[in-house]
Image (tube, rainbow, N blue to C red):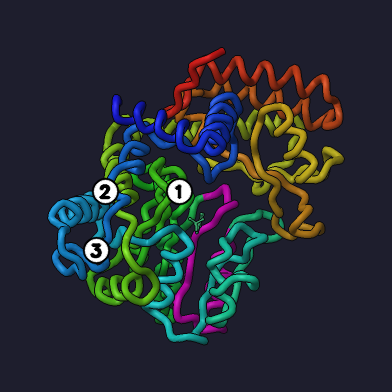
């Protein structure tokens, strides 16, 4: 701890401008209800590893096969983290070096596909990620991308449509995963479809990895030959990612990450991933993940009662997608009004959105961060009530100030992991 305090002092003296802005951000994260479903609070232990001397090291290669000397501790760290990843997810091979989720997916395509071959993923406005073949992304530029959608009425993945499209397009890889899909993935069916058309199956579980390891979402293994995940979402670790796969893909995946796409691994991140994986293997974490889902269901139930229209009618996981059309407000305005009131979320397209991506109809909320603070169903009811008031009167500045004050009170009662805000 002394080290951390001294480090803080060093930053304050060396760069007071950056120091002040970090402090402001710290307070903002502490005093607001953060509902962005891809965000969380990493523990103090995770952040201590992130801010360690490991950032000073170069170690291109893999444990035992480095291009630099002086790796006696780095090799031990990376091996330990690989072992933890394999044990936690029950896989044969783990590459823990990808810089983030997008580079991890790029590495999988690089390993398994030739340029121009076909990627089949979920369309972005229907919940998929940019890297699953969306048109402005490398995945649609270097490969041929075909996209499946959700059903127009149920807003759920229509597995018959996925099968039909796969038979017609014969993709080399089928990708599942989403940033805005409130329902469970049927990995078994997706795996069967992939086998039938002789495609690889990549399960990108970035959003739901924490729920998967806790057993509150179905597991992609053994159905998917390759799994990617970020570490900084429901897994509550540092910004980073990993690729988990069957042994048969291990060499291709490792060569794709290094030397094909990346240089030296971010060893400070690797260590912090290890800390997060250790935390995620505890019963305490499993209870956290269960509470994330209970909270999302409570929040969804309360919003439904208040006349909010939820995409797919509710949630199975940590996130909720709200169509604000019937409330007479668009997503962006709604998200801005909520932010003024201390409730942070993001505007988001909804499936078959009649509006444009930069001003879509919906907002996206989720419970990973508030649950890390120890909030439960009672607090979710309170948050829904605030959201209802603010969305009903988005221009009401007095209301925003009042709600913001109440939000701050609530947040003080539920301190955020990794953050100590000292003065009043
Ligand atoms: C967040 C996310 C990514 C990308 O992660 P970055 O770290 O932002 O590059 C990829 N896929 C899915 C499904 C995600 O949710």
Tag 1 or tag 3, which sits nearer the N-term? 3
Q: Find the distance from the CA under tag 2 to the CA under tag 3.
A: 12 Å
The residue indicated by pointer 2 is 88
Residue 16 visible in rendering = yes
**Element under label 2?**
helix
**Element under label 3?**
strand
Tag 3 or tag 2, which sits nearer the N-term? 2
Magenta highlight range: 157-183
129 relative position to 48: left or right: right
Q: Looking at the picture, how far across and down is residue 110, in whole percent?
A: 41, 77
Q: Is residue 266 above or below residue 164?
A: above
Q: Pointer 3 and pointer 1: residues touching (CB < 8 Å)?
A: no
**344 or 365, which lies in front?**
344
**167 or 275, which lies in front?**
275
**Residue occupying the point 56% across, 69% down:** 160
The residue indicated by pointer 3 is 93
Q: Identify the image quadrant of residue 17.
A: top right
């Amino acid at each position: 701890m002394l080290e951390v305090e001294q480090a803080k002092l060093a930053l304050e003296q060396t760069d007071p401008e950056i120091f002040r802005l970090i402090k402001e951000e710290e307070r903002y994260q502490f005093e607001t209800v953060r509902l962005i479903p891809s965000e969380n609070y990493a523990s103090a232990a995770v952040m201590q590893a992130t801010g360690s001397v490991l950032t000073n090291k170069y170690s291109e290669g893999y444990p035992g096969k480095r291009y630099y000397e002086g790796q006696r501790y780095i090799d031990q760290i990376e091996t330990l983290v690989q072992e933890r990843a394999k044990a936690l997810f029950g896989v044969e091979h783990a590459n823990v070096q990808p810089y983030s989720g997008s580079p991890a997916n790029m590495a999988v395509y690089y390993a398994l596909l030739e340029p121009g071959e076909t990627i089949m993923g979920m369309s972005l406005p229907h919940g998929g990620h940019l890297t699953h073949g969306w048109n402005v992304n490398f995945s649609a530029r270097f490969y041929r991308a075909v996209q499946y959608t959700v059903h127009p009425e149920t807003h759920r993945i229509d597995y018959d449509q996925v099968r039909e499209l796969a038979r017609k397009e014969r993709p080399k890889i089928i990708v599942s995963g989403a940033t805005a899909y409130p329902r469970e993935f049927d990995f078994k069916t997706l795996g069967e479809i992939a086998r039938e058309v002789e495609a690889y199956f990549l399960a990108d579980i970035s959003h739901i990895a924490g729920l998967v390891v806790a057993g509150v979402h179905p597991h992609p293994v053994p159905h998917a030959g390759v799994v990617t995940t970020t570490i900084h979402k429901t897994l509550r670790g540092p910004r980073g990612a990993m690729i988990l796969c069957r042994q048969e893909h291990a060499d291709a995946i490792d060569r794709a990450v290094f030397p094909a796409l990346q240089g030296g691994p971010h060893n400070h991140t690797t260590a912090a991933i290890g800390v997060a994986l250790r935390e995620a293997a505890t019963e305490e974490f499993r209870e956290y993940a269960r509470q994330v889902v209970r909270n999302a269901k409570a929040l969804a139930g309360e919003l439904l009662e208040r006349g909010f229209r939820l995409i797919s009618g509710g949630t199975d996981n940590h996130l909720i997608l709200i169509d604000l059309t019937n409330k007479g407000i668009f997503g962006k305005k709604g998200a801005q009004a909520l932010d003024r009131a201390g409730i942070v979320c993001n505007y988001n397209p909804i499936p078959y959105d009649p509006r444009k991506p930069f001003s879509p109809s919906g907002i996206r909320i989720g419970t990973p961060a508030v649950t890390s603070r120890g909030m439960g169903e009672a607090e979710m009811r309170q948050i829904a009530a605030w959201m209802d008031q603010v969305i009903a009167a988005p221009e009401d500045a007095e209301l925003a100030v009042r709600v913001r004050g109440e939000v701050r009170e609530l947040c003080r009662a539920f301190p955020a992991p990794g953050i100590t805000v000292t003065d009043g």
